[in-house]
Amino acid sequence: MPWTQLGEWWKAELAGDPAYEEVVTPLLLDVLQPQAGSIYLDLGCGDGRVMASVRASGATPIGVELVPDLARLASDHAPTLVARLPDLDSIRTDSVDGAYAVLVLEHLEDTASFLEVVARLVRPGGVFGLVINHPTWTAPGSTPITDDDGEVLWRSGDYFGPGGYTDEPAGDRKVTFYHRTTAQLLNDAAGAGWSLEKMVEVPHHEFGDQSGIPRLMACRWQLLP
């Protein structure tokens, strides 16, 4: 399902949900460490809510968003380009100090190409911050299960299966989540010239009995000269 048809679902999904403010945005800021005066691309910025926090740090965000309705909302926080990732030929090489993507990569089929494009846009020595659904969560067939004693366990699903994806409900439509292992993500980043500086894993924030199960993962890379 084209994302251009999912803007209303996305806005309704986040309306009144404190997860972004309480968990997701602080996680991104922790790994990105935005510097005052620096310019960062927000790749897949949605309605721009993360850009507002990045701008509050003294940095200058620039949004990239596929859905025109969301891009209009994002433009209230920072200049926003309507474009489809990773097709960003209109942006100059080495033109920004850093970039970040929040809960976007799992909707892109080709991780390696995306990371290579980001490496072209960011100046040598610049940074890339990433927040994703943890790879243990996106594996086809992975799900929490409850045994007869009420203990919540985790079914791993097809974690190592090649090219896995799932289509999840999005209102009356569906949205695709592409799965890749942690190893694939880290190797694709290294192949694009990114050096890992920090990785954070966050447990599930909704269910206390799943506190041992990773829900989100965040990384900070620096672009090798």
Image: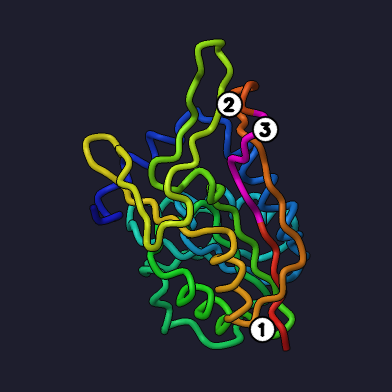
Q: Quadrant of the C terminus?
A: bottom right
Residue carrying label 1: 123
Mark 1 or 3, nearer chain start: 1
Q: Is residue 77 left or right of residue 35?
A: left
Residue depth check, mark 1 versus mark 3: number of the one nearer the observer? 3
Question: For the residue marked with disc 1, what is the amino acid?
Answer: Arg
- Residue at the image point whose x is 70% and y is 63% from the top: 220
Do we see residue 75 in this rendering?
A: no
* Relative side of 208 to 13, left or right: right
Query: Position of 214 compared to 133: left or right?
Result: right
* Residue sitting at the far top: 149
Disc 1 or 2, which lies upstream in sequence? Answer: 1
Residue displayed at 61% across by 59% down: 130
- Which residue carries the number 2 mark? 206
Tag 3 secondary structure: loop
Q: Nearer the viewer, mark 1 or mark 2?
A: 2
Instruction: Find residue 39 and report its horizontal and vertical position in percent.
Output: 66, 71
Q: Which mark is residue 212?
A: 3
Q: Determine if the magenta segment contains residue 216.
A: yes
- Check if mark 1's residue and mark 2's residue have beta carbons within 8 Å: no
The x and y percentages for residue 34 are 73, 62
Classify residue 13 as left or right of residue 203: left
Give me the C-alpha separation between circle 2 and circle 3: 12 Å
Quick one: label 1, few (<14), some, or many (20+) residues within 10 Å?
Answer: some
Sort mark 2 into few (<14), some (14-19) or many (20+) by Cα contacts within 10 Å: few
Tell me where residue 159 appears, x and y as whole percent.
48, 51
Q: Which mark is residue 30?
A: none
Q: Nearer the viewer, residue 210 or 6?
A: 210
Element carrying mark 1: strand
Q: CA distance from mark 1 to mark 3?
A: 38 Å
Residue farthest to the front, as pictured: 148
